[in-house]
Image (cartoon, grey):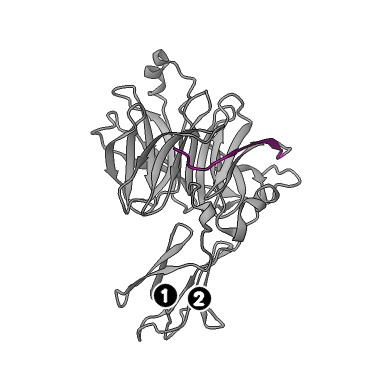
Amino acid sequence: MVSLSCKCVLSFVTYFLLVDKISCNSIGSDSIAIDGLIVEERDRFTLYKINLVDVPKGVCAEDIKVDLIGSQFAHVTTGVSGIEWKVKLHQTIPPELQQHPFTQGLVFSRTDGRLLESSGGYKNSFLREFDYKTSETLRIAYLEQGVFAEGITQIIDPKTLRKIVMMLTYKNGLVLFFDYETFKLIRTVELDYVGFGVCSNYDIHLKPEELPEFVKEQKVWLSTGEGILYQVDIPLDIETGPMKLINPQTILYNSEPLMYVNDMEYKHISNTIVANVWPTNTLVEIDIETCEVKRVYNFDEILKGEIPSKIDALNGIAIDPENPNKAYLTGKYFEHIYAVMLDDSNCVLPETHKTVISY
């Protein structure tokens, strides 16, 4: 049973892609032809629309595959002809918003107000640490071209007991490990997965003498957008050991699988995971033992003014290290970070901070 407050209703919004100069000579049974468009309905919202124009003969709806590339582009392929397209979406990112991160992950790194943030994109992904009160970027590490950053979390290397920033990638099949102190990439692991969100039970209040015991109980959870929560088998030596996904559990909301669970944060006080559901402004709180959604928080009213032309949705949750019922929320190209209460009030606090990437 899911306990909801009066405003806690999952609201899945519609997300459209329009692909120019692509047609199909026949329509697959899983797609619908509407006004010259192929419309793919998937999990409560429209994933894409494709114009039926100029596609090579023999290419059908079921042959077309569309991958999202951030908020501006889609990558289109066909299994039959091997032809690829990179196409622009209907909506574009206003120049004034491009100075803000395309946030994929957010987590407090220290108790003095420092946050770690990952920003996605195939050309300009990065990891940064910044002061959320001033938005000043304190450190930044750029990823290689073609690597799309996704969610991040902090872990402890069982061998050296140093703090590591673990970063997912979207469809690169890579997991990246950064040394927190040096901010340098120390290892890249190949893994067959699609990266959405990741979190761990690491607590930034842990003292150095407590780390040897902590690593014995260290846990990391990962989502791939497919309604499954995995645990990550962390190697005993981050720099050399093998890593794999274990213990898959279906994330359930009202007894149905919940797709597209994205950025995640572990909530120590309740042994739950708080996550946003892409592409909505909704957070869910997941019981780790049962993998069932036990609470839902909706912030549509609060954040709707932040997203002109519905560029993108909430993505970035950092639980306050001093108050486990308080969290800081932001999103892709959002101008602000919002402080909210994760309780029955769904209260948004008057405290907001700019997210401009300043150096």
The image's mark for residue 31 is: 2
**Residue 292 seen from this side:** no
Q: Locate the N terminus by quadrant.
A: top right
Judge the density around disc 2: few (<14), some (14-19), many (≥20) Cα neighbours within 10 Å: some
Q: Which residue is drawn at 42% across and 67% down?
A: 66
Which residue is more in the foreground, 32 or 89? 89
Q: In this view, does 317 lie to the left or right of 198?
A: right
Mark 2 vs 1: CB contact within 8 A: yes
Question: Upstream in the sequence, badge 2 or badge 1?
Answer: 2
Extent of the magenta region: 346-359
**x, y percent for residue 84:** 33, 71
Q: Which amino acid does label 2 sit on?
A: Ser
Question: Regarding mark 1 in the picture, which secondary structure is present there?
Answer: helix
**x, y percent for residue 62:** 42, 75
Q: Is residue 100 left or right of residue 172?
A: right
**Residue picked out by circle 1:** 62
Q: Is residue 287 above or below residue 75?
A: above
Q: Which residue is drawn at 31% across and 52% down?
A: 145
Q: Which residue is drawn at 55% across and 28% down?
A: 268
Q: What residue type is labelled 1?
A: Glu
Q: Locate the C terminus by quadrant.
A: top left
Q: What's the CA distance linking mark 2 and mark 1?
A: 8 Å
Question: Regarding mark 2 in the picture, which secondary structure is present there?
Answer: loop
